[in-house]
Image: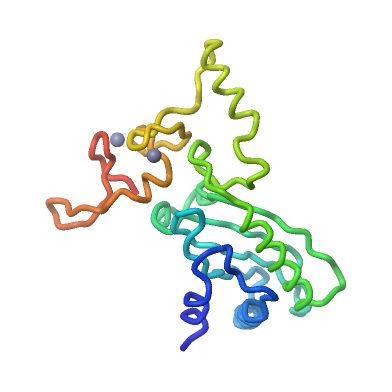
Amino acid sequence: MNTTTAMTAMTTDASVIPAPQEKYLAYVMKEIAKNTQAKTEINLQIKKIDGLLVNVFLVLGVNGDRTALTFAHLKILSATIFEIIDEDLESKLLFLRTFNVEEHTGLEFQIANILQDCKSALVKIKFDKKLGKYCSVETQTPSFCEAFEIGEETGVLSVFQDCCVCYEKTITLTACNHSLCIPCWSATKCTEDEDGEENRHCPICREIII
Ligand SMILES: [Zn+2]
Ligand SMILES: [Zn+2]
């Protein structure tokens, strides 16, 4: 069994990242060793968070002599949508967290700490339909969002519209300008077009959405 398959079988949800994470640590160390670049992007093999299919990456900067980390980010992308977009990918992130790397502690120790930070971050996040992103539970629905809604009554246009499927507030729009929250977007089934291609279609106007 290769490493990827083993990791997939081991972790299907963020809450089950094993502690003390020995297997994860070995996996991450192996992925770093495989790569000779200054930046390594490691798929953490977490498949689902808060009901959404995701790809979770640990992005690590490694110094020239491969003995220490220079930076560490955790990022989450949807596994079902946005994956064909290359340009402007950063704005399609569903979650991004940057961790402090403690210097002079050694690569393996730094990574063990980062994995612990990842776990702490991942178990606390919930998907916020309104913002179309994952938010930490304590910061979910930040007050500035509420300000936009109050703004609606005071004549300032709200940035939130009702999702055309579940009618909950959301900021996310399709390219055809229809409001569709990420969970409903992900749940939209692909159907076959006349030319035989499988595509997702906007629930309102049937335009192709990614
Ligand atoms: Zn929805
Ligand atoms: Zn549409």
Quarter of the displayed picture in which ligand 1 can be seen: top left
Identified at 61% across, 40% down, the residue is: 140
Q: Is residue 81 left or right of residue 89?
A: left
**Left or right of 84 on screen, residue 135:** right
In the displayed image of the protein, which residue is found farthest to the bottom?
Answer: 1
The quadrant in which residue 149 appears is: top right
Q: How many marks?
A: 0
Which is nearer the eye, 69 or 7? 7
* Residue farthest along the top direction in this orientation: 154
| Rendered location of residue 193, percent (x, y) | 16, 51
Position of residue 158 measured from the top left corner of the image (x, y, whole percent):
50, 22
The residue at 57%/18% (across/down) is 150
Q: Picture coordinates of residue 137 (x, y %)?
A: 63, 46
For residue 45, side relative to residue 19 (left or right): left
Residue lying at 75% horizontally and 72% vertically, measured from the top left:
63
Say above or below: 182 vs 160. below
Q: Judge whether 148 appears above or below 122 on screen.
A: above
- Which residue is at a point 48% across and 75% down the rendered structure image? 8
Q: Is residue 31 above or below residue 144?
A: below
Of residues 26 and 93, the one nearer the viewer is: 26
Task: Give the image's coloring scheme.
Answer: rainbow
| Image quadrant in which you'd find residue 180 | top left
Residue found at the very far right of the displayed protein: 104
Q: Is 150 displayed left or right of 178 in the figure?
A: right
> Percent from the top left, x then y, of residue 68?
78, 74
